[in-house]
């Protein structure tokens, strides 16, 4: 490859990695984690932790954390190099599967806890509204907002189930999926804030990521 060609590849790779990092934030993946995935996607062969560190100028700790998260999201797979203790990471390149994996994790970490809490919050406010004292203006507004959030989250959940049960982006439409993801993220944050002010406690936190180190060597 000529010098000009190599420079073009490097430029495109760098821009692709930066863009993927920005998109990761949209889907709930930390920017550094998304950049590692984008960098692996740009390569023809899997890479080990040292190569990732050098390619992205990241610390060992940052690469370790990113790879743990990517393994949790099922976006990379560790592979042992034959005849060596070296472990390399291969990215998931089937974008339909990538989308399903992201949806599965976000549904489990965020959407399911929100909907579960809605089943408690909405009846609690409805009971107050039907009491002898009647609903206060503040509770009436809050109840109306929670019902609207629950309705939209129900639609998002239906989309998630459609994908997780084998539906494809082509069947549904990428634009609709992206829009649903943005709505779910914003409404999820709103629901948490509103619920915290109402009940004095937050929605359940995201599940912890298992402690998996990129440099761990399987026996």
Image (cartoon, rainbow, N blue to C red):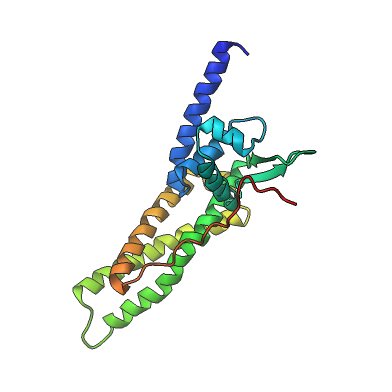
Taking 39 as reference, is 200 above or below it? below
Residue at the image point whose x is 60% and y is 35% from the top = 50
Drawn side of residue 185 relative to residue 165, left or right: left
Residue 40 lies, in percent from the top left, at 59, 35
The number of numbered discs placed on residues in the rendered structure image is 0
Q: Dividing the picture into quarters, in which one does residue 148 lie? A: bottom left
Q: Position of residue 94 (x, y in %)?
A: 63, 41
* 134 lies above or below 71: below
Q: Where is residue 191 in the image (x, y as percent from the top left)?
A: 35, 63
107 vs 213: above or below:
below
Q: Nearer the viewer, residue 213 or 188?
A: 213
Q: Which residue lies furthest to the bottom in this view?
A: 132
- Residue 146, placed above or below residue 210: below
Q: Does the rendering let one see residue 171? A: no
* Rendering coords of residue 36 (x, y %): 54, 38
Residue 135 makes an appearance in the image:
yes
> Going by the image, does 137 lie left or right of 107?
left
Image quarter where the N terminus lies is top right
Q: Which of 212 and 119 is in front in this view?
A: 212
Q: Residue at x 50, y 36 (%)?
A: 58
């Amino acid at each position: 490859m000529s010098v000009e060609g190599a420079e073009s590849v490097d430029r495109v790779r760098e821009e692709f990695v930066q863009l993927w990092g920005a998109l990761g934030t949209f889907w709930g993946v930390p920017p550094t984690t998304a950049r590692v995935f984008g960098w692996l996607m740009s390569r023809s062969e899997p890479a080990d932790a040292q190569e990732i560190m050098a390619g992205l100028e990241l610390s060992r700790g940052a690469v370790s954390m990113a790879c743990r998260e990517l393994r949790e999201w099922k976006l990379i797979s560790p592979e042992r190099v034959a005849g060596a203790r070296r472990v390399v990471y291969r990215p998931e390149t089937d974008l339909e599967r990538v989308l399903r994996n992201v949806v599965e994790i976000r549904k489990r970490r965020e959407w399911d806890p929100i909907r579960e809490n809605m089943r408690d919050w909405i009846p609690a406010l409805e009971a107050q509204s039907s009491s002898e004292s009647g609903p206060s203006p503040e509770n009436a507004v809050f109840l109306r907002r929670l019902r609207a959030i629950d309705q939209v989250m129900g639609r998002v959940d239906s989309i998630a189930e459609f994908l997780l049960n084998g539906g494809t982006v082509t069947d549904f439409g990428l634009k609709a999926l992206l829009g649903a993801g943005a709505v779910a993220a914003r409404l999820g944050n709103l629901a948490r804030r509103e619920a915290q002010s109402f009940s004095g406690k937050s929605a359940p936190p995201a599940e912890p990521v298992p402690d998996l180190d990129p440099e761990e060597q399987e026996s």
